[in-house]
Structures are given as C-alpha cells and as structure tokens.
Amino acid sequence: MMRIYENYYDIIVLPPKKVQDKLIALSEKLTGGKGLWQLGEREYIPHLSLYHIPVKPTDFEQLAQKTRDVISRVSFGEIRCQKAEKFDPHNSVFITTNNPDWLVKLHQEIIQKTLPLFDWSYDVKGIWHAEQFPDEARANFDRYGTPMAGSYFQPHFTLTIFPDRNTMTERYSTFSFEPFAFQADEVAIGQLGDHIQIASVIKRYPKKQ
C-alpha cells in the first residue's frame, strides 16, 4: 500500500487504457521484480506529469475548476514515446517523449492558472530532496514549487526506481524499447504518494468529442 501525501496532487496527462497497459508491461519487463515498485492499474498509475501542486483542502475545488477551464481550451495532439533513459541520481528509468508546442502550452497554462493556489507551507523540498537537483531546478522550487518548469519540463513516463545503482544498471543494460506514439485525449488530477507517483486518479478531464 502506497503512503499518501495528503493534499498534494499532480496534474497529469493520463494516457489511453491501451497505452497504460503497454507502459505497465514495460515496467514489469524492466524491473524483473527488482524495482522498488512497478507501474500498475490501481497505484503507481502510468502518467505524464504537468504540475505537482499541494493545496489546502479548502482550495481543492478551485484547483479542479481552474484545471477544467484550461482543459476546455486545449487542442490535444500526439505524444511520441521516444527512448528509455536512466537517471543515475535517483536510480530511476523513464520513457522520454517529445515536447510538442501544444504540450508546452498546456503545461505553462496549468502553472499560470493554478500557482496562486499553491500551499507554500507544504514541505515539497523535503519530499523531493531538492538539494540533489542542479541550480536551475532548485530555483524552480522557489518560483513554482516544482523542479519541472522552464527548461526542466522534460516530459516522460517513469517506469520504476531501483534500490541501488548496480541493480538499475544491470536491468537497464538488457532492457529493449521500441518507440511508439499515441493521441493524447485526457488530463487528470492525481493523488500523490510514495516516490512522487500517482496513488489514485481523483478528477478526470477527457477531450470533448
């Protein structure tokens, strides 16, 4: 059972079910039972993060409304999953994607509209171990409350985190990945838990037909 970070959320691109299933299978293949966790349907849900934001309980409905307002103006497009990469400082492996204009615009508008609701009393730096990040990313914590902004908005799907560098290197060295693409069609608000991953999806905003 994941530990939950109460009142801490991630506004995400939630991929279609077939893509979620594919990412879950890739996570299982990569970890071989040796990861600290692997993607699943009920927790550690596959997602592409747009903005991590803690809000006070009284502000959650405003967060949901502001997210809904942004999504109502979005023209969704294609996301290309390009390659598997390892991130040595966190012993993690993720699938990097392209960063098309529509996704950059969505990310920026989400931050602009919801930042006023950010609960700055929340210990996000402690949860993220902000001291491990480069200077620009640490500056983003002070400005936006997350490292993932500006040039550090590098969209990806995290597949797992390993307990140590040697295990990550061993599993990554034999992992194969074939690029694929999908049409994005939904944004959601997820409840954050252990390893800053999605414990559950709270609000969903599918593309209007």
Image (spheres, rainbow, N blue to C red):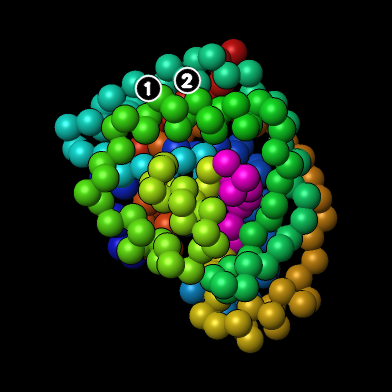
Identity, as a three-letter code, of the amino acid under mark 1: Lys
Coordinates of residue 156 in the picture (x, y in percent):
63, 50
Q: Which residues are magenta?
A: 150-159
Considering depth in this image, is 142 or 192 the residue closer to the camera? Answer: 142
- Label 1 sits on a secondary structure element that is helix
Residue under the image location 43 percent in, 17 percent down: 69
Coordinates of residue 83 in the picture (x, y in percent):
77, 56
Q: Is residue 140 left or right of residue 193?
A: right
Residue under the image location 73 percent in, 42 percent down: 98
> Which dot marks residue 197?
none
For mark 2, what is the residue?
70
Considering depth in this image, is 108 or 194 the residue closer to the camera? Answer: 108
For mark 1, what is the residue?
66
Q: Is residue 43 left or right of residue 136?
A: left
Q: Is residue 29 left or right of residue 129?
A: right
The magenta stretch spans residue 57: no
Q: Quadrant of the C terminus?
A: top right
Q: Tell me the quarter of the picture where residue 194 sits.
A: bottom left
Q: Tell me the quarter of the picture where residue 32 sits.
A: bottom right
- Label 2 to label 1, Cα distance in Å? 6 Å
Question: Please, is residue 10 above or below residue 133 in the view?
Answer: above
